[in-house]
Image (cartoon, helix red, strand yellow):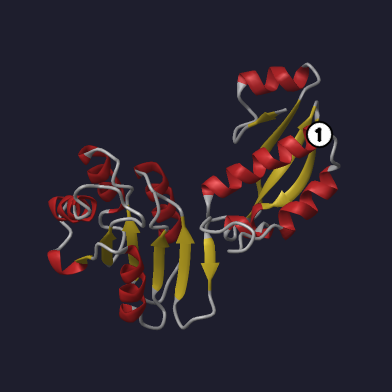
Amino acid sequence: ILVTRDAGQKAVREHLAAGGMAVGLESSGNADWIVLHNGSETMRIAATAEIPATWNGHLRFAVDNAMHAAAMAIGFGVAPECVAEGLRHFVQDPELLPCRMNLVTRFPFTVLLDYAHNPHGLRALSDAVLAVPTAGRRILAFGIPDDRTDDAIRAAALAVAHKYDHYFCSGILNSRASDPERAPRLLAEALESAGVLPEQITVIRDPLERIGAVATMARPGDFLVITAGIG
């Protein structure tokens, strides 16, 4: 079973013509649907907006994950309607998937917990946050494992520059680095080099103190993004 966002590709068309299957994405009206192509037939599985993990379809990578999950389940013989039910009821809560896009809405502000710890993950996380309307500020509290190279740490900061209103840069729990100030310092320096104003940056080495500081700063309507401070 192939997974594709473009079922019109030659390789996909040939695969389907030979009797193969593919899970794809199709737009219909105002909705995007995950669909199953089986030879010449197409069956809708679920609208992306119906899948909680996609945040109403805003999270591109979560839609891709859902498509791959559907393909694997169908490949193992699970009926498409059962796959649809599974996707509609899968919720990324802290107990089921800790620090994996956990959205907490019980406060006057919104909190998002995630494990993003490299440039690719932080960029995807930030793009997802920007896709969601918010009444207040977007605030990022993040730390990078301090066994990374200087360039890797700087790249992580550049991946999020100008995407938030304030940044809390910290180290990680149980750091074994000889200089525990290095990672948060490099993050802050890289943000400033990208044009982020110094008053938008707070450096706090301890990731637990960082959480307290960001919660203290939060106002109703803000969107707080906190990454796991672990290596």
114 horizontally vs 36: left or right: left
Query: Within 10 Å of the Cα at label 1, are there few (<14), some (14-19), or many (20+) other Cα atoms?
Result: few
**Between 161 and 189, which is closer to the camera in this rendering?**
189
The quadrant in which residue 88 appears is bottom right
Residue 223 spot, x, y in % from top left: 41, 71
How many numbered markers are drawn?
1
| Residue depicted at x 25% and y 47% | 177
| Residue depicted at x 37% and y 44% | 118
Residue 73 spot, x, y in % from top left: 77, 39
The quadrant in which residue 213 appears is bottom left
**Between 215 and 172, which is closer to the camera in this rendering?**
172
Query: Which amino acid type corresponds to the residue marked 1 in the rendered image?
Result: Phe
| Residue depicted at x 73% and y 59% | 89
| Residue depicted at x 26% and y 54% | 161
The quadrant in which residue 152 appears is top left
13 horizontally vs 9: left or right: right
For disc 1, the marked residue is 76
192 horizontally vs 34: left or right: left
Q: Is residue 20 visible?
A: yes
Give above or below for 60 relative to 211: above
Q: Is residue 25 visible?
A: no
Residue 217 spot, x, y in % from top left: 30, 79
SS of the residue at dot 1? loop
In the picture, the quarter occupied by the N terminus is top right
